[in-house]
Image: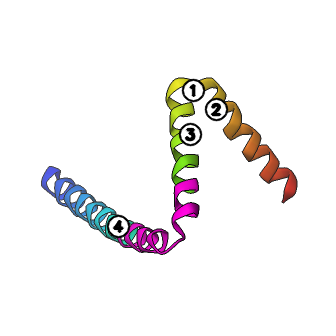
Amino acid sequence: MLEYESDDEERILRSRISVLKHVALEMSDEIRSQNIKLKNLEPGFNDTLNSIFRNIKNIRKLKPNHFKTWLYYIGATKIIVL
């Protein structure tokens, strides 16, 4: 009976790994397409986006409590708007 359970567990594990592989491939394709779209933007706009993301990353690293508060604020605002 242990061998039977082992086969089931192996099948489940292989299935989950396959799903994760496909999800990773889809995400990679989406990221590539987004990067292509970003490259086609005007340079000034692209620089602005990079600056915004850099600022967010810095706030997240240097002031994690402020970052969490900011996320909660955005989430609450979104809930109120919906």
Residue 59 x, y percent position in the rendering: 57, 32
Q: Earlier in the sequence, mark 4 or mark 3?
A: 4
| Separation of residues labelled 3 and 2 (CA atoms) | 14 Å
Residue 73 x, y percent position in the rendering: 76, 39
Magenta region includes residue 45:
yes
Residue 72 x, y percent position in the rendering: 72, 38
- Quick check: 56 above or below 65? below
Magenta extent = 28-48
Which numbered disc covers residue 68?
A: 2
Q: Earlier in the sequence, mark 1 or mark 4?
A: 4
The residue tagged 3 is 55
The residue tagged 4 is 28
Which numbered disc covers residue 56?
A: none
**Secondary structure under badge 1?**
helix
Magenta region includes residue 26:
no
* Residues at marks 1 and 4 touching, judged by CB atoms closer than 8 Å: no
Which image quarter is the C terminus in? Answer: bottom right
Q: Earlier in the sequence, mark 1 or mark 3?
A: 3
- Quick check: 59 above or below 76? above
Residues 14 and 79: in front is 79
The residue tagged 1 is 64
Q: Residue at x 52, y 61 (%)?
A: 46
